[in-house]
Image (cartoon, helix red, strand yellow):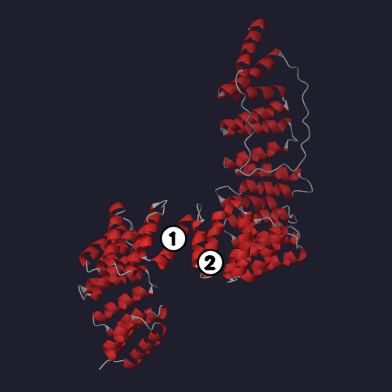
Amino acid sequence: MNSSFKYLVVGSLLLTACAQVPKQVEPVAPAVSVEPQQVEVAPVLPNVELTDELLYEYLLTEIASQRGHQALALEGSADLARKTRDPRLARRAAQLAVESGQMERAIDAFRQWQEVEPGASVAGRMLSSILLRGGKLGEAKQEYAKQLQAAGTDPGPVFIQVFQQLAPYADKQAALQLMQELAQPYPQVAEARWSVAQLAQLAGDVALALSEAKQARSLRPEWDTAVSLEAQLLLKNEPQQGLEALRRYLVSYPDAREIRLQYARALLEQKHYKPARDEFQRLAKDSPDNPDMAFAIALISLQLKDFKGAEEQLRLSLGEGKKNQDRVQYYLGQLSEAKESEEEALAHYREVKDGEHRFAAQLRILYLLNKRDGLEPARAHLRQIRADNNQQRVQLLLIEAQLLREAQRNVDAYQVLQQGLEKLPNHPDLLYEAAMLADKNGKHDVAEQLLRKLIQLKPDHAHAYNALGYSLIERNERLDEALALVEKALQLAPDDAAIMDSVGWGYYRSGRLDDSVNMLRRAFAGNPDPEIASHLGEVLWVRGDKEEARKVWQDTLKAHPDNALLQAVIKKFTTP
């Protein structure tokens, strides 16, 4: 190519390139970026003459990159880096190789960059990240070891960087082993111990994680990150020890805000409400404009039934936290209900316009309207509530049916659920509740059909088996089949007192009195419910244990004096 033609081609390419917006691309960072700890030394530039050929190749490479000609750009950049040994061009070649997604080319490019610029720490970090992502743990370990050696007497920050690269690695055990091998020559470096602890936790080795975290804290007692990890690990299995670790640290370092916040949250999680509130109040003094602190104090005050204190904090949060108005109004409504100020509660709930508490606030309005104005105004409000998903739609149907049942309108309640099933024919909750109402309304065939459909859809639905079996037992029909159904339910839910009651009642109807008493006693011990008491008393009476039967009935009647079922059973067996 003659000289004039060459410059014509280059000039044409430059004009074309200048007409486009250049694409600025930085090298791909590790999964968690870390600021370099070493100060980068300005690279030593080679004494290479900028010939026409080099200039042409450089421009061609850059324009090829902008136009999407990846292969040409990769070849050109790698060739320029080899010819010139210029660290700037080596960095560019590494950048283009990373963008290409070709791991082997990227590894070669970064090794070339390291060779021409040994002081470029970012090259080592990027290379180790690429090797790790490619599953080349042995080679990655060598790069990490070089970075630790280069750090001299302060390898701690490098350990943190290495942990951040290893944390997302899929094989947690391999990542842990790599970190342990890197940390072995640095037994007195707290960050090394902390990094091993973190990866041990991710790998599920809690004992190792706790041991290493304690060593990290011992090596650097002032390091809040170490004590935070130790406390976090302790709180899972030894909560009191975890709380004590945080408390001791705060005695020595009372201004450690993040540790105090962790301590306050841990106290709250362990239901130590008063000391938790004290800690949040101390934090709030340092951040008087933080509405979240006031909100936390308010919720704890609610738990302590300090309604005045809760209201003060909620109103403070309401005044300062513009983004949390809906949430605060919801809890003000809850507070008003706790104070039995129902009109005030309604006013607060009506202020909840959006957010996670909108639907719950509308339900509270519904219940309060039903209590104050009766069924029809409540149903009118219910039809205005916006449901965002099927779960909320079903919840509204179940609530409407419940309100109708409470008003002794069982037929209407059943119709509501039937209408719901027309739109959601396979919803388990609708099937179950509709079956219960069908059975209550005497539609036993319909109830059985619905329950069998539910069992087909959800073979592990213990209460569907129980409901079908108990309905048959109550009607004294197909007792063998009924008993098989309730026993299946008990297999699925062995600790459910209501199902134990069904099984015990089935034994009674089948003439197995001793088995019945044993099962009903288990049920009554789990839940001293009036219905279970009536069943247990009846079986005891029939078996001849009349004094024990009277005691069961009378003790339960004291706790439930208005229970009609219990009263009827007592009258049936004790009235001459």
**Residue 273, image quadrant:** bottom right
- Residue 528, image x, y percentages: 40, 80
- Residue 309, image x, y percentages: 63, 68
Figure quadrant of the C terminus: bottom left
Q: Residue at x 34, y 79 (%)?
A: 531
Residue where numbered disc 2 is placed: 336
Looking at numbered disc 1 in the image, what kind of residue is underneath it? Leu
**Residue 66, image quadrant:** top right
Sequence-earlier tag: 2 or 1: 2
Q: Residue at x 58, y 41 (%)?
A: 133
Using the image as rendered, state which of residue 272 and residue 47 is in the foreground: 272
> In the image, which disc is placed on residue 363?
1
Q: Image check: 87 left or right of 455?
A: right
**Residue 270, image quadrant:** bottom right
Q: Image check: 206 left or right of 370?
A: right
> In the image, which disc is placed on residue 23?
none
Q: Image check: 2 left or right of 574?
A: right
How dense is the environment of label 2, judged by Cα within 10 Å: few (below 14), some, or many (20 and up)?
many
Q: Residue at x 25, y 75 (%)?
A: 474
Asked if one can make out residue 301 in the rendered structure from this viewpoint, the answer is: yes
Using the image as rendered, state which of residue 79 and residue 378 is in the foreground: 378
Secondary structure beneath label 2: helix
